[in-house]
């Protein structure tokens, strides 16, 4: 399958690497809205201006969209789904139905497939919520994130006056995790599920007490959590906090039996050294499914919920049954 | 959907309970090769002789087969797939390709769907092996079972002279689990992955040392493992070991990055109080998928690899996207 990448940030770089490691994929090019001469791919792959895309209509099987969910993808995915089979990682959970509707119209009218919201949450975590709830209808779902870096929370700290740089880790509360894993089905508040650890580089002479107070009282981002603020030097931040690890767990605790007497716990968990590279690996597997589904005549907007697992694997159905079932 | 159950052992009883808890399913009847008057269902459901099945051809959407993999299902599934849409839990991994071929012919010729090898392994563990390997092609898979009761190993002990009853637990080795979860990708022998705990009730006056020796040296079942034998009274066995708990973990440890520098660990784990009731819950979700796929004109033998996750859930695609994605 012939793959294009649209957008070359952290995610686009991860997709480049994942496509080059997929035996059944060929990377045709990287497309950018910047000046192509300023984009330096890791490998030997051409970079084109986004405006050149129309001439690639017959040269790409799937275009993987690596824009952001806030402003890029709501416009980008419907627009490009009118010309290409696409995969995106749209992750604003509440806006998924509206995004789906816009993309579905564009893809259906033009007879393409667009697979939206691929990645790990939404994505792998979502299918595990679905599988677990379909199997244990009498139960309760929990999603824990971390320990991992939240870009949004790190950015929020950086916008505070006197902050030069910052990194925020989301951390599940061990007691909450243990209770859920034990099948206790606790009711948990926001504060009881996660804590927030902040590593902050302040400007010289900044008022550290004020910065710490502004972080801990910031609505939506920190006010509802137990937050720990640690001031570090720029050297310490670069030395200890440049990675982009993440992960988490989806847990469903449920019961079966005529008297609900048997408890079951299903847990799916990820420990990721690189959030963007892992997300990129999911996007490439989804591109394979899009390519195969389109070759069977399927069109419209899809999510990972609509993808039979076999379509994600490079192995044949016979190999899968013999080796993995 | 109208469901029938074929066979009423532990698994059939679990299916009865799971169907009665599914809002979109109606249990039409239990079919047995025994004298129907000797079968006492938990609920208010008719029991029929298996020979009456032909008159139910238009009254059942899916027949769930609750026979054993050793001798029942290899004959039962192809035979019944010629008359009904069926789901089975065939779990002899090495024989799956042959079983698939036989069932596929019967189901395709008669225009039914037969979903084979549903449950948790094969089943949920299998799809997690598939998803994880499709996403992290450069990696290594591990499956650990337990702590849980193995019926096959318990039966093997019971066949030893002087043994009145026995229960065998398969237990993962904690150090092996920790190493795999840490992303170390160890090479593990059979002995390094699992230990076996046996609780044995001996006949009065039996030679306990001989029984223990026969267990520990039994080829295939115990000789390759570190095995612990504990003799207990019949009362202790009934008090402490009548449940059918099981579970385990599927773990894939893999790397991404141009220099394989980023490690990722994907883990799917189950802790089940009742192995048969949980397996039954998977079968009922699969019956829902079979019913929907058949209504779209799909026929032939399928596995869980061929089922889009959305087809397992009673929720609509819109509800799934809004609530679970």
Image (cartoon, coloured by chain):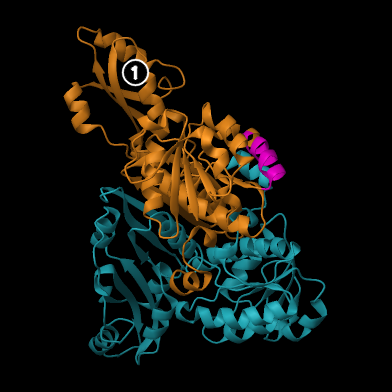
Chain colours: A orange, B cyan
> Which chain is home to disc 1?
A
Q: Which stretch did the figure color magenta?
A: A99-111
B290 or B148, nearer to the observer: B290
x and y, in percent, of residue A297 in the image: 67, 57
Q: Is residue A100 magenta?
A: yes
Q: Residue at x 65, y 33 (%)?
A: A98
* Closest to the observer, A259 or A174: A174
Q: Is residue B18 left or right of residue B195?
A: right
Residue at 39%, 80% (x, y): give it.
Answer: B153
User: Could you tell me which residue is drawn at 33 percent across and 59 percent down?
Assistant: B139
Residue A226, image x and y in percent?
36, 25
Q: Quadrant of residue A76?
A: top right
Q: Position of residue B148 (x, y in %)?
A: 40, 67
User: Is residue A200 one of those drawn in magenta?
Assistant: no
Disc 1 marks which residue? Answer: A158
Residue A248, percent across and down?
A: 39, 43
Can residue A201 be seen from the camera position used here?
yes
In the shown orientation, is residue B210 left or right of residue A150? left
Observer able to see residue A259: no
Taking B166 as reference, is B174 left or right? left
Main secondary-structure element of the magenta-colored stretch: helix
Q: The residue tagged with tag 1: helix, strand or loop?
A: helix
Crowding around mark 1 (Cα neighbors within 10 Å: few <14, some 14 to 19, many 20+) is some
Is residue B121 depicted above or below B252 in this figure?
A: below
């Amino acid at each position: 399958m012939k793959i294009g990448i649209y957008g070359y940030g952290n995610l686009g770089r991860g997709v480049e690497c994942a496509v080059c490691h997929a035996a059944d994929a060929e990377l045709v090019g990287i497309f950018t809205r910047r000046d192509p001469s300023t984009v330096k791919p890791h490998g030997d792959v051409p970079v084109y201006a986004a405006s050149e895309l129309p001439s690639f209509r017959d040269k790409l099987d799937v275009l993987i969209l690596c824009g952001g969910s806030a402003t890029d993808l709501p416009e980008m995915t419907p627009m490009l789904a009118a010309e290409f089979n696409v995969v995106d990682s749209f992750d604003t959970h509440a806006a998924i139905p509206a995004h789906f509707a816009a993309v579905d119209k564009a893809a259906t009218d033009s007879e393409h497939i667009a697979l939206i919201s691929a990645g790990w949450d939404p994505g792998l975590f979502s299918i595990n919520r679905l599988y677990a709830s379909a199997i244990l209808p009498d139960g309760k779902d929990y999603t824990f994130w971390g320990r991992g870096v939240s870009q949004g929370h790190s950015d929020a700290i950086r916008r505070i006056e006197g902050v030069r740089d910052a990194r925020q880790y989301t951390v599940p509360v061990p007691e909450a995790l243990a209770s859920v894993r034990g099948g206790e089905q606790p009711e948990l508040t926001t504060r009881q599920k996660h804590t927030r650890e902040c590593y902050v580089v302040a400007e010289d002479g900044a008022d550290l007490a004020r910065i710490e107070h502004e972080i801990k009282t910031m609505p939506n981002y920190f006010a509802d959590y137990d937050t720990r603020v640690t001031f570090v030097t720029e050297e310490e931040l670069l030395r200890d906090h440049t990675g982009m690890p993440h992960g988490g767990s989806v847990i469903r605790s449920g019961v079966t039996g005529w008297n609900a007497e048997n408890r079951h716990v299903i847990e799916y968990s990820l420990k990721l050294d690189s959030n963007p590279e892992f997300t990129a690996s999911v996007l490439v597997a989804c591109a394979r499914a899009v390519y195969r589904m389109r070759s069977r005549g399927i069109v419209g907007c899809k999510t990972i919920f609509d993808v039979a697992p076999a379509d994600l694997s490079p192995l044949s159905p016979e190999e899968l049954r013999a080796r993995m079932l």
